[in-house]
Amino acid sequence: MQVAGNAMNELKLRPTSQKRTPPRARSSLLRSAALPALLALSLNLGACKKISEVSASFGDITGSTGSASATVPPDQLGLHRYNADWGARYEKNPDNKRIVMNYALGLRAAQRHDQATAILQKAAIKDPGDLEMLAAYGKALADAGRLQEAAQVLEKAQVPERPNWSVLSTQGSVADQMGNHAMAQQYYQEALKVAPGEPSVLSNLGLSFALNRQLPEGERVLRQASAHQRADRRVRQNLALVLALQGKFAEAENVLQKDLSPSDAAANVASIRSMIAQSNTWREIQTLDGKPAPAAKPRTRQPAAPPRQG
């Protein structure tokens, strides 16, 4: 899966209209722009390394799809072969649930969102009572940015007597992307009641706090997530991002060195540092209430960090 552009380009806020935007509407626009910015930067940390690390959506960080039994390869060539194989199987047997789920997983990893949603929609229509299929369909819709539809489908995939933590987490991600961080955090808390300490849910919750300008709280939750024995590098990347956004560059670099070489970790932190210095994006996000941002400090050349042991 290719990550479009670099983090700096992804983080530019683009006006949607030439008309003057009222303060409340402007706040909403900035909040909606904040999530792609934060997520784009989080996904770009080490994104050239492995495809499996950038294939999950904000809500489906584990990549879990219930009945999907195959593992998506971590490289472009492997993913191409995976999709060719499961695509051929799907052509022969489009009603087989395992085939549908595995093929959809590969399509999502390849960012072929329209195709993934199409085959999952077809399967969900045939069996509207299959909660796993509805969950996969809702996650694919969320990947595609079809948030209202995703919210509706995910609601149908959830039953009060048997709550699914992964679906709850994705519902939270959809709410975050729609700018309703309070609701998103309620979903994440409900997911944690079902799966206490689940690092992927904690990671989403930490990012949600960060999007809501609660960076210290986001750091606290992400530290909890990264301390879990099943935490993967994406969780640690999110922690490093939130640390760097608070100016804790050395700590962010130390976190990244758990998965990257010292030079790669330093390069990633340097990219975040450059973004913060050269862009007003984060200053705008941090002043959504309309208060003027503090004057920028004069930029000074920082000494090169000494080599660290990986």
Image: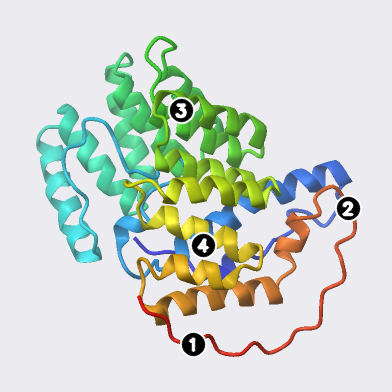
Q: Secondary structure at mark 1?
A: loop
Q: Which label's residue is closer to the chain start, 2 or 1?
A: 2
Q: What residue sits 38% from the left and 48% below the top?
A: 56
Q: Are marks 4 and 1 in contact (CB under 8 Å)?
A: no
C-alpha distance separating marks 4 and 1 = 18 Å
Q: Position of residue 165 (x, y in %)?
A: 40, 27
Q: Position of residue 297 (x, y in %)?
A: 81, 77
Query: Which residue is identified by label 4?
Result: 240
- Quadrant of the image for the N terminus? bottom left
C-alpha distance separating marks 1 and 3 = 41 Å
Query: Which residue is identified by label 3?
Result: 191
Q: Are marks 3 and 2 in contact (CB under 8 Å)?
A: no
Q: Which mark is residue 306?
A: 1
Q: Position of residue 282 (x, y in %)?
A: 71, 62
Q: Nearer the viewer, residue 93 or 248?
A: 248
Q: Which label's residue is closer to the chain start, 4 or 1?
A: 4
Q: Nearer the viewer, residue 105 or 20?
A: 105
